[in-house]
Image (cartoon, rainbow, N blue to C red):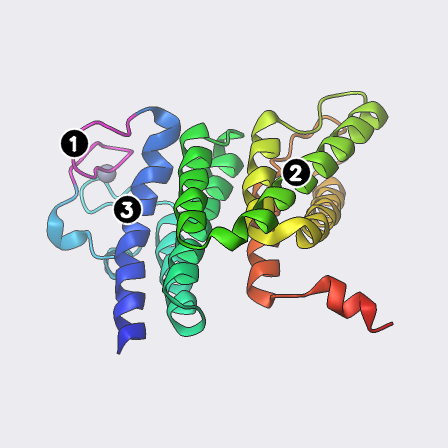
Amino acid sequence: MVQLFAIMLGLTFGSFLNVVIYRLPRNLFFSKSRSFCPHCKYQIPFHSNIPVISYLIQGGKCTNCAASISRHYPIVELLSALIWGWASFNYGLHQGILFIWICSILLAISIIDHETFIIPFPLIISALLGFLVYIYFNPTEWRVSFWGAIMGVGYLSLVFLLTSAIFNKQTLGLGDLQLIAITGMWLGPVNVLLSVFISALLALIIWGILSLFKGFDRNRAMPFGPYLSGSAILLYVLDIDLLTYLSTF
Ligand SMILES: [Zn+2]
């Protein structure tokens, strides 16, 4: 019952996340207007603002101008429901709230970085505040978070310097380093290294596939945020204890 409630809340929270994803990079965050169609500016009435369902009923089109609505709206709502559901099934209150907070921010960062190549600083600060509150209630956790951030930023800086030297251009942004500090605090010093490794590998594979289909372009820009975020959530959910695993050899 609690889980069902969490999933419903997750769907609704997903709608709010969509607003953040749309407004934050456009500096519209504090504008008072209700949700509107980005194409014709038609204000979306309350009854067609139901997560996922409205999208399906309208066939993914605006009721006013019939412009197609980006698929990422219902996808974000569904992922948000999944995040809330997973948290309510698997974690206690504090860890669950932190999980929802961090995953939601990572989801927003992934889509914004994918669309605009920007990782908004307010989202980094929001995640950091989440950790501070969590550590206030769970003070013994500070050590893992502290060393996780140090290791993450250190290792990614090394990757950044090496790849920039090899490709002779800036390969990562400052936003990526801020992001790894956040996922490092969440994953701890061991798994954050694994996360950087998996992200780089995935990005390389996707880059290879894109090069095959769209032609080789050494200047093709690829946002790294979605890979860092995705691998962090995957490692957290799988809960791999690398040290224990390695010590069995
Ligand atoms: Zn419209």
- Provide the residue designation for mark 1: 33
9 left or right of 212 in image: left
Mark 2 in CB contact with mark 3 (< 8 angstroms): no
- Provide the residue designation for mark 2: 150
- Provide the residue designation for mark 3: 16
Q: How crowded is mark 1: few (under 14 residues within 10 Å), some or many (20 or more)?
A: few
Report the amino acid beneath label 1.
Answer: Ser
Q: From this viewpoint, which residue is outermost toward the bottom?
A: 1
Main SS class of the magenta portion in the image? loop
Give the label, 2 or 3, closer to the camera: 2
Secondary element at tag 2: helix
Q: Does the magenta stretch include residue 29?
A: yes
Image x and y of residue 79, in percent: 42, 59
Report the amino acid beneath label 3.
Answer: Phe
Q: Is residue 179 magenta?
A: no
Distance between the Cα atoms at labels 1 and 2?
41 Å
Image x and y of residue 48, in percent: 17, 53
Report the amino acid beneath label 2.
Answer: Ile
Q: Which stretch did the figure color magenta?
A: 28-43
